[in-house]
Image: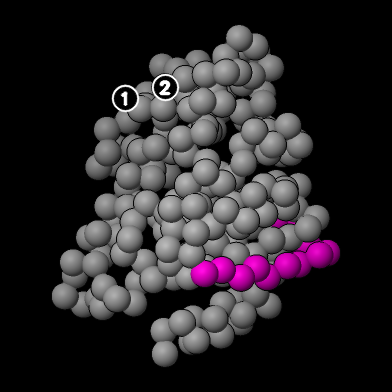
Amino acid sequence: MTTGTNTPGATPDPHHSSLSNAVPGKTTEGILDSERYYYRRVYVDAVRAITAVAESVHVDPARIVVAGGSQGGGLALAAASLSDVPVGALIDVPFLCHFGRAITVSDRDPCREISRYLSVNRDHAERVLRTLSHVDGASLASRATASALFSVALMDATCPPSTVYAAYNRYGGPKSMAVYPFNDHEGGQEFHQVEKYRWLARLLR
C-alpha cells in the first residue's frame, strides 16, 4: 500500500491503477479480483493495527475502541466486524456500505469513481459487484459484537443514509444511532463529538 505522499508503505501494492485499468482514486484499484482489491488490503492493515495496539504494554486491551468518519467510519465498521478485540466502535457517516445501492444513487466521489469505471467497462459489472460484496460493511456488520454508536446525516449525498442504515440494521452488537436530519456529509461535527464523549464515558466507566 502507498501512503498519502506516494511513498511505499509496509504492504506491497502491486495493483496500482496503472495496472488495473482503474479510474483516478482508490476505489477501483484491483476491483476485478477480490483477493487483490485495494480495500481488502486496507482492512487487513486495520485489523493488524488493532492487534499491535492490543499487545502494547501501554494499552489496556479490554478498553480498545475503533472510531472514524466517512471512509474512516467504514474502516471502523470493518475493524469491529473482523476483529474481536474492540469493545466499542464509533462509526460516523460511513462509506464502504451497501455498494450496490451507493453506486447507483450517489453522484459524488468516491462512489462515482466506481460508476464511472463501469460506464466505460460495461461488461465488468458482475465481477465488480462480486468483489465489492467481500468488503461491504453491510455484509460484514453481522459479525460484529462490540457496542457501537453510529451516526447518519439524512441529506448526505456522499454516503446516502440508506447505505448507512443497511449496515446499522445488520450490525451484530449492541448499537444506537444518532440522526442528523438537516446535514450533508459533514454529519453532526462537534455537536456529535460531545455525544461520542458521553457514549464513551458510559461504555468505559
Instruction: Where is residue 23? Give x, y as percent.
Output: 56, 23
Nearer to me, 137 or 109: 137
Q: Which amino acid does label 2 sit on?
A: Asp
Q: Name the residue under label 1.
A: 14
169 in relation to 66, above or below: above
Q: Is the C-beta separation of discs 1 and 2 under 8 Å?
A: no
Q: Which residue lies furthest to the bottom in this view?
A: 205
Q: Is residue 183 left or right of residue 41?
A: right
Q: Judge whether residue 73 can be spotted in this image.
A: no
Instruction: Where is residue 178? Give x, y as percent.
Output: 68, 70
Instruction: Where is residue 100? Give x, y as percent.
Output: 64, 33
Q: Which of marks 1 and 2 is in front?
A: 2
Q: In this view, does 83 lie to the left or right of 38?
A: left
Between marks 1 and 2, how big is the CA–CA gap? 13 Å
Instruction: Where is residue 95? Give x, y as percent.
Output: 59, 48
Q: What residue type is labelled 1?
A: Pro
Secondary structure type for disc 1: loop
> Which disc, if any, is residue 6?
none
112 in relation to 98, above or below: above
Question: Which span of residues is magenta-colored?
Answer: 174-186
